[in-house]
Image (cartoon, grey):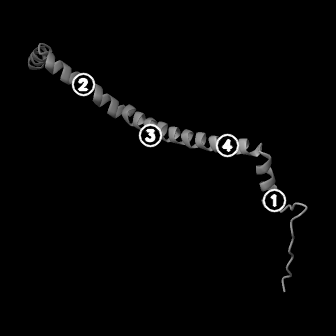
Amino acid sequence: MKNIVLWIEETLNRPAKVIIFSLVFVIGSLVFEGSLWRLYILQKEKQKLSKNIQIEKNKIALILKEIKRAKDPSFLEHQARERLELLEEDDLLFIFSDN
């Protein structure tokens, strides 16, 4: 018992040993408790969410460009011709039979 008390007194009189022991204790508790692993997982999740946010912002920017283009009458006319197969008065229409 005296040996343990002497070792503790000797260790406490050396600040470098106290700092090393404290650091080992703190790191050990964080590792065994799982806090470091949880922090790592949360950091990875944050990176993934940040990437998803940037992708969605890019999509929003493209949609806003399309909205601006949709206000242009020539764009609307072009879309109507392509999607609805509309013709102007002077356009020719050719109809071919399946045979």
Of pointers 3 and 2, the one earlier in the residue sequence: 2
Marks 4 and 3, how far apart at CA: 32 Å
For this orientation, the residue located farthest to the right is: 89
Q: Which residue is mark 4?
A: 65
Vertical position of residue 79 compared to residue 58: above or below: below
- Depth check: 9 or 67 in front? 67
Amino acid found under the numbered disc labelled 2: Leu
- Depth check: 49 or 19 in front? 49
Vertical position of residue 45 compared to residue 83: above or below: above
Q: Which residue is mark 3?
A: 44
For mark 2, give the secondary structure: helix
Of pointers 2 and 4, the one earlier in the residue sequence: 2
Q: Nearer the viewer, mark 2 or mark 1?
A: 1
Marks 2 and 1, how far apart at CA: 73 Å
Q: Is residue 44 left or right of residue 3?
A: right
Q: Which residue is mark 2?
A: 23
The percent coordinates of residue 50 (x first, y second) are 51, 38
Q: Nearer the viewer, mark 4 or mark 3?
A: 4
Of pointers 2 and 1, the one earlier in the residue sequence: 2
Q: Which residue is mark 1?
A: 81
Vertical position of residue 90 compared to residue 31: above or below: below
Q: Residue at x 43, y 36 (%)?
A: 43
Vertical position of residue 15 compared to residue 41: above or below: above
